[in-house]
Image (spheres, rainbow, N blue to C red):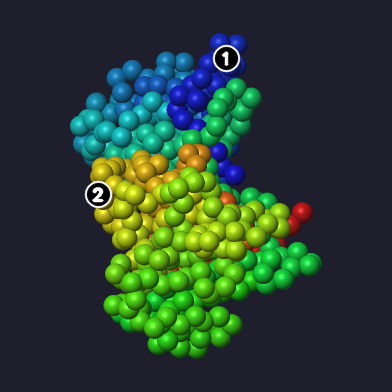
Amino acid sequence: MLRGVSAEAVRAAEAPLLAAGEPLMLRAARALADHVHEMLPASAGRDGGVARVLVLAGAGANGGDGLHAAAMLRGEGVAADAVATAERIHGEAAAALRDAGGAILPLADTAPGVLEETLAAADLVLDAILGIGGRPEVPPTLGPLLAVVAAARVPVLAVDLPSFVDATTGQAAPEALTAHATITFGAVKAGLLLPGGAERAGALHLVDLGLATHLEGPAAVLRLEDADVRAVWPGPGRDATKYSRGVVALAAGSDPFPGAAVLAVSGAARAGAGMVRCIAPQAVLDQVLRERPETVGHRVERAVGGPAAVDLAAVGRTDALVVGPGLPPEDPRACAGVDRLRRDPHDGTDRDGTDRTGRDHGSHDGDPHGRLDRGVIDAGGLATLTPQHRFGPDVVLTPHRGEAERLADRLDIDPGLPAPSLATALAAATGATVLLKGAVTVIAPGDGGPLRAQDDATPQLATAGTGDVLAGVLGTLLAAGLTGPDAAALAALLHGRAGRLASHDGLRPLVALDVAAHLPEVIGTILAGALP
């Protein structure tokens, strides 16, 4: 599990080590120089030449890390030079580079065309302008430099984090460089895991500087990795039954959107559900059963304009309920499903929930209203929510940005908030866990725990129906007994990874059913890789 911490927490952890005289900068520089050797292309230095590295060095310790690393690289056969982006840079580190034979070009004094020529000869650029004190605002003096570097298309290695990215929030200036990789020191900064920073960080590499024992308080952001999947995966034991694996019911699909039910059911089935129920009109069920004949169908007479209420509890045992894929908001299943998942307004307790200890978390026998405390509210279900709706943290809302903004409007929340703040506000207002879909998926737990942020997806997932597949996957994981935040993070990871596999790592277009079809392979590959 990657644990992202705030800039304030990093400073507090560094303070006792710096006071004790620990050479943190030299340790960081050594690790940085070692990583430069790994990143330099195989062609660098061929034909009698040498590999060339250019450091963009700012005024603070971040610039010092880059300059010291350049000095070390000079002693190891790499032609490392620097551009000073500030009038004053780290004196000791600058002296070390000059003593090693490196040149430092003051940006303010660089003649037109010189920077372009220098970049044209470079094999790698180190972004060491700003560190954890950086803000997402580029001063006018540095905007042209960043534009020239971006246009040169030279690989960029960010030092600690990309410059002009907020280390805590991830907010990034539009001009901030996009790194191929980031080598971060002491602890992963929360902003590297959140939208903005995550897109610019590239591959993350953490260097241990001994800060771990000095970091206090919980992480600000968590990210699930492959190695964590085995610990939370609800795979079947030797004595498993279809019921112990979890029964997920989906109120999905309508005359205008019948395919949404096929997609959501496929996501649920391919993620390993013990049983999948689909509650839909007969025409929708016919399509679902043609694609997934193992589905248990429950016919409703009319999807729209039918009875004032639909008894979703009458379908039988249900461990998690997915409401909304392909439903118009006026569909009676949308309101009925949301009502079944909401907290009892009279007792204020978590309704008949379950864990994986054998208690029947899905049965409605203990609740005369047939309420559940596990489920997914998506699409048409989201459109029915009002300020009066309250849920438990094992109910997960799955809006995309537009749906989140519309819901925020109804709940008197600023819809223009950054994604982490918007998801957090929606979770606080509803009590549910919120999975805010995007290039980086942000998950705000309904119980107020640390944010989760998953960066597993490919842009090829931006196509109709992939959200329906995600809702089905999430429903299966909730039915198996995972908590809302764990299920949301794992669903986002599996869904994103399946999209990458289906699109050949983003090189080919995909359709939503491709994502569902690749889920078993992704799950098997991750679990096999996690075996001891």
| Local crowd size for mark 1, using a 10 Å CA cut-off: few (<14), some (14–19), many (≥20) | few
Residue at (51% x, 69% y) in the render: 313
Front residue of 421 and 129: 421
Front residue of 30 and 384: 384
Cβ–Cβ under 8 Å for marks 1 and 2: no
Residue at (61% x, 28% y) in the render: 212
Front residue of 434 and 68: 434
Give the residue number, with chain letter if any, for mark 2. 409
Measuring from the top left, give residue 158's x and y in whole percent: 44, 38
Measuring from the top left, give residue 280's x and y in whole percent: 43, 79
Q: Is residue 531 above or below residue 111?
A: below
Front residue of 203 and 421: 421
Of labels 1 and 2, earlier in sequence is: 1
Q: Amino acid at mark 1?
A: Pro
Q: Is residue 264 above or below residue 390?
A: below
Residue at (33% x, 17% y) in the render: 88
Give the residue number, with chain letter if any, for mark 1. 16
Residue at (45% x, 24% y) in the render: 8
Measuring from the top left, give residue 146's x and y in whole percent: 29, 39
- Cα–Cα gap, marks 1 and 2: 46 Å
Task: Give the numbered dot on residue 319.
Answer: none
Residue 119 visible somewhere in the drawing: no
Kindly state the secondary structure of the residue where label 2 is placed.
helix
Q: Amino acid at mark 2?
A: Asp
